[in-house]
């Protein structure tokens, strides 16, 4: 079995959603002076490679700590959208031409290759997003979740977070800021994305991996 890391490293200067707060991770004890090293971690629940719970946009939405871990692991299919450019839409035909493998999957991962722009201004600049018809399909087929190598399922200027609302109100989990999707060389694989378990979590950083036969 081959295991691939799909997770960006958390750093104090990494890309974050505009208006958010940068991580502030500080070494507070070190081996030379204290005999051990300890890092104090301050991080937004939606920084880096992370997942969104229904509570992210819904007042009475479920939080990650209340969800069974079965929701975070399952078979996944990658939909290759890397031919798209700035401002393009991931239309339903991407689902249609991958439908046979998608129907065997619990998660759909949309590969735009946008992660190559991580830590640059272009990463936040009008990345491709899925169409409403794609969301209709995901909801009607009751997928566990969908994932992206971009910062959001909604466009960067959509303050209403309409796509978030549609998906999360139907208990479809959202995984954002994946990386290394170009290393996946199979159509179907095990996706595992375990969030930090903290009380009332509206979202959380994850260590996302792909497990390939």
Image (spheres, grey):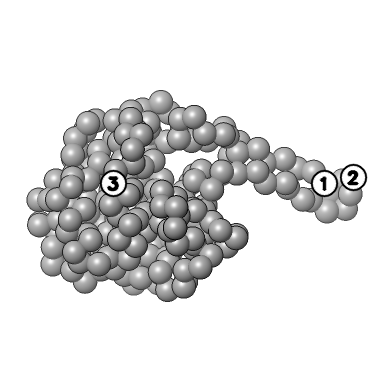
Q: Is residue 33 visible?
A: yes
In this view, 159 is above or below 148: above
Say whether disc 2 or disc 3 marks the residue closer to the N-terminus.
Answer: 2
Is residue 25 rendered to the left or right of residue 113? Answer: right
In this view, 73 is above or below 205: below
Element marked by disc 1 = strand
Q: Is residue 9 visible?
A: no
* Image quarter of the N terminus: bottom left
Instruction: Give the farthest residue toward the front.
Output: 60
Q: Which residue is mark 3?
A: 163
Give me the residue at 33% from left, 57% from top. 169
Q: Which mark is residue 33?
A: 2
Asked if marks 1 and 3 touch (Cβ < 8 Å), the reply is no
Give me the residue at 75% from left, 42% from top. 27
State which mark lies toward you, 1 or 3: 3
Is residue 60 rendered to the left or right of residue 21? Answer: left
Q: Nearer the viewer, residue 74 or 134?
A: 134
Quarter of the rendering containing residue 128? top left
Q: Which residue is mark 1?
A: 29
Q: Residues within 10 Å of mark 1 (few under 14, many from 20)?
A: some
Give me the residue at 42% from left, 73% from top. 70
Q: Gap between marks 2 and 1, in whole Å?
A: 7 Å
Is residue 138 rendered to the left or right of residue 182? Answer: left
Q: Which mark is residue 164?
A: none
Quarter of the rendering containing residue 145? bottom left
Q: Residues within 10 Å of mark 3 (few under 14, many from 20)?
A: some
State which mark lies toward you, 2 or 3: 3
Asked if marks 2 and 1 touch (Cβ < 8 Å), the reply is yes
Element marked by disc 3 = helix
């Amino acid at each position: 079995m081959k295991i691939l890391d799909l997770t960006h490293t958390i750093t104090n200067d990494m890309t974050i959603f505009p208006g958010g707060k940068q991580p502030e991770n500080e070494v507070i004890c070190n081996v030379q002076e204290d005999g051990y090293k300890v890092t104090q971690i301050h991080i937004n629940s939606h920084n880096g490679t992370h997942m969104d719970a229904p509570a992210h946009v819904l007042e009475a939405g479920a939080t990650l700590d209340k969800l069974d871990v079965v929701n975070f692991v399952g078979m996944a299919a990658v939909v290759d959208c890397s031919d798209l450019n700035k401002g393009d839409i991931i239309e339903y035909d991407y689902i249609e031409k991958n439908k046979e493998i998608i129907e065997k999957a619990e998660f759909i991962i949309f590969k735009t290759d946008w992660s190559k722009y991580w830590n640059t201004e272009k990463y936040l600049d009008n990345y491709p997003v899925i169409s409403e018809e794609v969301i209709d399909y995901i909801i009607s087929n009751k997928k566990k979740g969908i994932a992206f190598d971009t910062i959001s399922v909604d466009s960067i200027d959509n303050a209403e977070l309409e796509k978030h609302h549609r998906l999360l109100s139907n208990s479809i989990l959202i995984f954002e800021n994946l990386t290394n999707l170009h290393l996946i060389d199979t159509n179907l694989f095990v996706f595992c994305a375990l969030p930090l378990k903290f009380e009332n979590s509206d979202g959380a950083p994850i260590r996302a991996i792909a497990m390939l036969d």
